[in-house]
Image: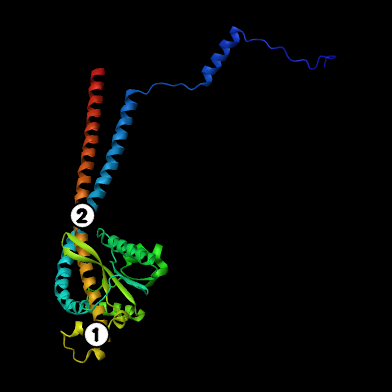
């Protein structure tokens, strides 16, 4: 340290021209050499790109073709099942309608005034059938909101695993009974319908609403939400009105002895008819859905085939240009 002057710093000198030349030479040694790709390397890169593109498109074409084969097979299976289900429906509905017409003669109110409402929803156990299960779940959900907005408690009795899956996330606490895999091993029959209705009768619903898909034609169906007459409602009816409605029929034994059995038979017939129509609507909707899926797969395959042919043609054109360029260079 100098006296009173602080630390002595080294003297700085600007670099001269010789030092700059040496620095540039050193940097040229360190910096990697960069050269433009040759014509051969660019051609090989283009060939690799075309080959990769063609391979990926070819794999996708194969998968789309396999999916189309599956959807065509499912359409044929659905068409075969539709004929059997439609035949069973045509035989079973005339069996169900008389007792339904009998109970429709009773005076009833479409909108319940009091008491909990049990909603019986008929859905399917399998998917890939269009909007069959979606519409049934939607109707159930909207009517549930309407009843609860009126201050009525709601209970859900769901037939079909797809209906359960669509409603359990929001309304699992309203479930009383869920039925799954009822018509998979055996066709829809009245015995299975009676076994399911036995579980419904144990709850003795005060108000009952049935949601199902009504079969109209092979191309269309309609989701319906109908009222069913319960034992509690009949007990609340005026006896004179009930007797007037039943006077056109003769009962053996008297209605006082057979009414409970007749009412349970009405439950079974109503559910059986709804189940028949829902099963037929499911197969018709699946047949239409698989037909549309096969058509879409065919269109996708045509687009992929066009893309593959374009890539193949581009590869051939590139190879020809390389051959011509090499011949002219020689």
| Residue located farthest toward the right when viewing the structure as drawn | 3
Residue 181 found in image quarter: bottom left
- In the drawing, what numbered circle is on residue 38? none
In the rendered image, the quadrant that contains the N terminus is top right
Instruction: Give the SS element for disc 1.
Output: helix
- In the drawing, what numbered circle is on residue 240? 1
Q: 304 and 93: which one is in front?
A: 93
How far apart, in angstroms, are the residues tagged by discs 1 and 2? 64 Å
Q: As displayed, is residue 55 above or below residue 14? A: below
Instruction: Give the SS element for disc 2.
Output: helix
Residue 220, position in %: x, y? 18, 60
Residue 130, position in %: x, y? 25, 58
**How many numbered marks does the figure carry?**
2
Where does label 2 land, which residue?
69
Q: As displayed, is residue 19 above or below residue 119? A: above
Which marked residue is nearer to the observer: mark 1 or mark 2?
A: 1
């Amino acid at each position: 340290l100098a006296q009173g002057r602080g630390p002595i710093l080294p003297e700085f000198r600007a670099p001269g021209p010789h030092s700059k030349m040496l620095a540039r030479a050193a940097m040229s040694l360190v910096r990697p050499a960069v050269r433009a790709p040759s014509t051969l390397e660019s051609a090989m890169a283009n060939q690799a790109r075309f080959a990769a593109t063609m391979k990926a498109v070819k794999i996708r074409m194969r998968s789309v073709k396999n999916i189309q084969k599956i959807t065509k097979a499912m359409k044929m299976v659905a068409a075969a099942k539709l004929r059997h289900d439609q035949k069973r429906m045509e035989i079973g509905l005339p069996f169900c309608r008389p007792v339904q017409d009998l109970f429709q003669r009773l005076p009833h109110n479409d909108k319940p005034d009091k008491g909990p409402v049990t909603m019986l929803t008929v859905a399917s156990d399998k998917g890939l059938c269009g909007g069959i299960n979606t519409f049934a779940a939607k109707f159930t959900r909207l009517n549930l909101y309407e009843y609860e907005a009126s201050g009525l408690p709601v209970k859900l009795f769901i037939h079909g695993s797809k209906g359960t899956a669509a409603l359990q996330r929001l309304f699992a606490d309203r479930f009383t009974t869920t039925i799954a895999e009822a018509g998979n091993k055996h066709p829809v029959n009245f015995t299975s319908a009676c076994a399911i209705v036995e579980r419904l009768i144990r709850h003795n619903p005060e108000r009952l609403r049935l949601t199902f898909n009504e079969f109209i034609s092979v191309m269309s169906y309609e989701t319906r939400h109908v009222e069913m007459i319960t034992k509690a409602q009949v007990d609340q009816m005026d006896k004179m009105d009930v007797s007037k409605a039943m006077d056109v029929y003769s009962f053996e034994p008297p209605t006082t002895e057979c009414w409970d059995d007749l009412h349970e038979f009405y439950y079974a017939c109503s559910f059986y008819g709804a189940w028949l129509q829902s099963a037929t609507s499911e197969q018709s909707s699946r047949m239409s859905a698989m037909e549309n899926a096969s058509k879409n797969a065919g269109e996708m395959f045509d687009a992929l085939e066009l893309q593959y042919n374009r890539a193949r043609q581009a590869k051939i054109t590139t190879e020809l240009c390389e051959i011509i360029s090499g011949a002219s260079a020689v």
